[in-house]
Amino acid sequence: MITANRLGDGVVVFQDPTGVWTEDFHHAAVLSDEAAKAAALARAKQSEKDNEVIDPYWIELETRGGHYLPKALREAIRASGPTVRRDLGKQAEGLAPGVVQRASLEASHVSL
Amino acid sequence: MYRYDEFDAAFVASRVDQFRDQVARRISGELTEEQFRPHRLMNGLYLQLHAYMLRVAVPYGTLNSQQLRKLAEIARTYDRGYGHFTTRQNLQYNWPALKDTPDILAELAGVEMHAIQTSGNCIRNVTADHFAGVAADEIADPRPYAEILRQWSSNHPEFSFLPRKFKIAVNGGPHDRAAIQAHDIGLQIVKDASGAIGFIVYVGGGLGRTPFVAKKVRDFLPERDMLAYCDAILRVYNLEGRRDNKYKARIKILLHEKGLEGLRDAVETEFAANDKTGLALPEAEIARIRGYFAPPDLPTRALESPRVQRRLGKDAKFNAFVQSNVTPHRVPGYAIITVSLKPIGGVPGDASADQMDAVADLAEDYSHDELRVSHEQNLILPYVALDDLPAVYDRLASVELATPNAGLISDIIACPGLDYCALATARSIPIAQQLSERFGDGARAKGIGPLKIKISGCINACGHHHVGHIGILGLERAGEETYQITLGGSGDETASIGQITGPGFSSEKVIDAIETVVETYMSQRSGPQEAFLQTFRRVGMAPFKEALYERSAGSDI
């Protein structure tokens, strides 16, 4: 999956299958092979040059419970919002990954 | 407090205009991110995990009610209804849009505030003791000197592109509340035998990946030489500081490589050569700036307040609040109130817009319109009459700001960590939340006594973990958060860097590990009067290490 921050407001965005940026993790393109990844990154770099986003990069996913999730905790938090403020970020807008985070993050804000 | 003159106002307004133009050019594509980044950083604007982050300077931590209300209004209008007070007495907004930031800066300029030099390789916001001007033990108010340094360092053409960031702190009393020995330059106000004011000068303190306690380069620097001497230090650093490696670019590394004598000789040579540059401070100018910080006219009041005594006798919570959050004032009949931004289970340093408004109202009604931000992420009401304590307490309680834990184990410093920060390797706020819930603000916390826990979510150490009595450093190992514990650090006049206990702990085990450390302290201390740091310095690491790694379940890393 390709992610970046949108230039105008810094919001985390993901590249969808048509190469357009989306705020919704669920609408993002899952890149299943190296060729797809390279093509998507090239589109993202062009978008960066076109001043739509900042610093696009590829993130690794894993599957859990039938859902795709960012593998790294950092990316899980970017895709969802602060774990200490469930009322903020994508998680508050229904845009976070299906099973939001790994098991250690699923409980209340004070649980690790 | 200081008020802008025409020059200040014009300068800040012109910076807003410049930044508005830079933002417009960035959004239009005229500037690339690489070209724009230095401009946004010099105006305190970062890009973090979820959004941009704007860091607003609170010079030497002093605010008036109007300014705090403006910060609240900006939080409501442009952000998500809250702000985060930082370990450098600043305020951070976590969600501003780039396109709104020129308007935010214009709003700030309207109340004599800005975000200039809160980032970048320049001289950052100068910090000071948060009890400046009111501490009972104060030698002199550090803020006039911090303000002089602010004016000198703002937009300084020679020092705007240093090898790395540069932090200066000034402390006015014998007890160091500004952590000056953890700064690039630390100035400790002292008086010589004749009663003249001067400074002990420390250089080369810093935390981050290579922590050092500062070294003393001058026992007594006369007041008039403050700028000339700081200028000499900056010149030596600017010329000789390493620009080849950002991890070795701070002055602490230069000091380490040149040695104390080598650096001191270079500074003294530069200072002597520099003597004619017009930086000697005229007495009249010091007096003029000092005038801005003249204490309010405080009517004489009784040493004790019957109203407070009556309330103390019947209200245990008020009693606990007075014991931990009220500090003696230099003027009899008055008190300094610490407003804890560390609610049990809450986010250290966060305040909602409504809470900011409430504290602003209290400052206006009871504290001569003035308040402070502490580097420990709390707010201070510096001029409260003893008779007003019950009323102030009740109003703080009504907005959940009366947590009676200032200086206790749950008064934890924590950086934003991986919940917000692009540099973080682990979360720090959830650790602080769990610890504050574990130890609370009641009898247990009080029984443990003064104990400073400081948590950083990465090696850059924004949470000052190296100088925590108990420090916690969050790292990432094999995809998991892991927490390294240090003991025996201190940011006061007896500054020291904490020692690592040993292997780190997982997020599941670190809270129990801290409890083990605390229980070990309780069993080792000579009595309730011996604070954690004293016990650690007396008994050393061994009993803690044994408890952590041999007797308990221990580390799993």
Image: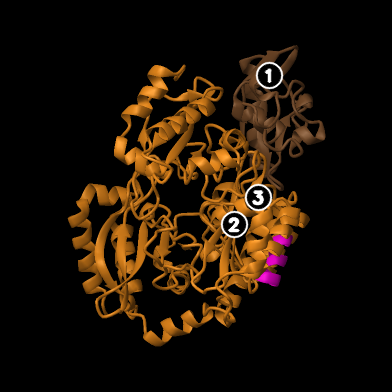
Judge whether B436 appears above or below B9 on screen. Answer: above
Between residue B41 and residue B533, name the one nearer to us: B533
* Image position, residue B342 (x, y; %): 61, 46
* Residue identifier under label 2: B322
Residue B364 inside the magenta-drawn segment: yes
Q: Chain of mark 3?
A: B
* Image position, residue B551 (x, y; %): 41, 18
Chain letter, colour brown in render: A
Left or right: residue B499 versus residue B76 is left
Left or right: residue B353 versus residue B297 is right
> Which SS does the magenta portion mostly show?
helix
Residue B372 inside the magenta-drawn segment: no
Q: Residue B475: in sight, yes or no? A: no
Residue type (three-letter) at the residue carrying disc 1: Leu
Chain letter, colour orange in render: B
Q: Residue A93: in sight, yes or no? A: yes
Which region shows up in magenta? B357-366
Q: Chain of mark 2?
A: B
Between circles 1 and 2, the one closer to the viewer is 2
Task: Say whether marks 1 and 2 touch (CB < 8 Å).
Answer: no
Give the numbered dot on residue B54.
none
- Quadrant of residue B287 in the image? bottom left
* Residue identifier under label 1: A31
Residue type (three-letter) at the residue carrying disc 3: Ala
* Residue identifier under label 3: B316
Callout 3 secondary element: helix
* Image position, residue A49 (x, y; %): 64, 41
How far apart are the alpha carbons under marks 2 and 3? 10 Å
